[in-house]
Amino acid sequence: MHYYRRLPQFEYVAPKSVEEGCSFLQANQAETRVIAGGTITLHRMKERIGVRKYLLSLKAIPGLDTMSANGDGKLKIGPMAFIQSVADSPIVRKQCALLGLACSIHGTPQIRNMGTIGGNV
């Protein structure tokens, strides 16, 4: 296996809404990789694994990092919620303590602060 230091060429796409992202994906699905935090994807791209023409980032779409619990005890976590945010969330600790614990020991502090729950699921 060869490890390359430089990323291959790609076009970075940052939609401002879910609708805009879905529209782009519909037109370019085979050539697009969706990224949340990008920690794993960028590393793999340096190894020339899973390289696509477009990287569609979810970072600019508001509301994808929210966490909430409804009255049924169900927990809702957006795909852009950082792993450390999940670990620190009082809602997560109350509703699903094991998930909070798992997130608190996942990777290094740098990975927890950059990696997202959506990218790691």
Image: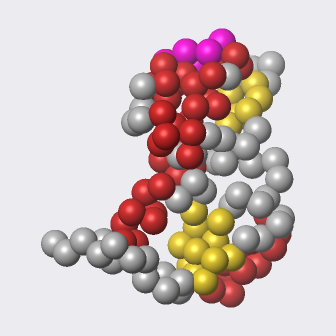
The x and y percentages for residue 7 are: 43, 77
The x and y percentages for residue 9 are: 49, 86
109 sits left or right of 78 in the view: left
At 68% across and 76% down in the image, what residue appears? 13
Asked if one can make out residue 121 in the rendered structure from this viewpoint, the answer is no
| In front of the other: 36 or 70 | 36
The x and y percentages for residue 53 are: 53, 86
Q: Residue furthest left?
A: 1
Asked if one can make out residue 2 in the rendered structure from this viewpoint, the answer is yes
In this view, 102 is above or below 97: below
In this view, 55 is above or below 75: below
Q: Indicate the quadrant containing the N terminus: top left, top right, bottom left or bottom right.
A: bottom left
The x and y percentages for residue 63 are: 81, 47
Quadrant hosting residue 25: bottom right
The secondary structure making up most of the magenta span is: helix
50 falls in the magenta region? no
14 sits left or right of 7 in the view: right
| In front of the other: 53 or 75 | 53
Quadrant hosting residue 47: bottom left
Q: How is the image coloured?
A: secondary structure
At 80% across and 19% down in the image, what residue appears? 71
The residue range painted magenta reads 93-98
Quadrant hosting residue 40: bottom left
94 falls in the magenta region? yes
Query: Across the whole image, how many numbered discs are drawn on residues?
Result: 0
